Image (cartoon, rainbow, N blue to C red):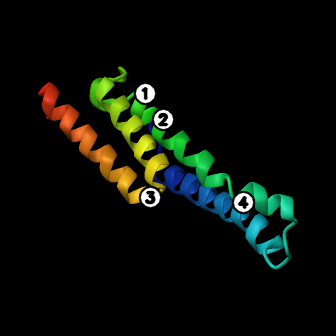
Amino acid sequence: MTYSAAEIWIVIALLGVGTFLIRFSFLGLIGDRPMPPFVLRLLRFTPVAVLPGMVAPLVLWPAATGGQPDIVRILAALATVGVGLWTRNVLWAVFAGVITLYAGLAATGLL
């Protein structure tokens, strides 16, 4: 199915308006009011919930292996989590994951 340039631009414009309205409903309409403490407490967990949802598919079904689980990527993820829990430092955790990933790829000859 092919779409004309006008149809594509209409879809882009509608998505832009929809995105604006979603954000405005939260920020514009209630942005100047204090939020209840339970909402603020729940919002603190948003990054903790979103980041694993973004990373898990990259670890469990990586595109680099055609969607097949790869022990090197799983070990790198475990190293990242382990160093993050041990040091409580995001940069050290990321560094450990990168080093583990590249060392594992080099050791298996995939790099």
> Marks 4 and 3, Cα distance to the nearest angstrom?
34 Å
At horizontal 41% and vertical 35% (from top left) the residue drawn is: 78
In the image, residue 58 sits, relative to residue 45, either above or below, namely above
Mark 1 vs 2: CB contact within 8 A: yes
Q: Residues within 10 Å of mark 4 (few under 14, many from 20)?
A: few
Asked if residue 110 can be seen in this view, the reply is no
Residue pointed to by mark 2: 56
The numbered disc on residue 22 is 4
The numbered disc on residue 60 is 1
Residue pointed to by mark 3: 89
Q: Nearer the viewer, mark 4 or mark 3?
A: 3
Q: Is residue 85 left or right of residue 69?
A: right
Please tell me in which quadrant of the rendered image residue 13 appears: bottom right
> In x, y percent, where is residue 40?
78, 63
N-terminal of the pair, mark 2 or mark 3, is 2
- Identify the secondary structure beneath mark 4: helix
Q: Nearer the viewer, mark 2 or mark 3?
A: 3
Quarter of the picture containing the C terminus is top left
Q: Is residue 49 left or right of residue 62?
A: right
- Identify the secondary structure beneath mark 1: helix
Q: Nearer the viewer, mark 4 or mark 1?
A: 1
> Marks 3 and 1, Cα distance to the nearest angstrom?
24 Å
The numbered disc on residue 39 is none
Front residue of 57 and 52: 52
At horizontal 43% and vertical 57% (from top left) the residue drawn is: 90
At horizontal 55% and vertical 40% (from top left) the residue drawn is: 53
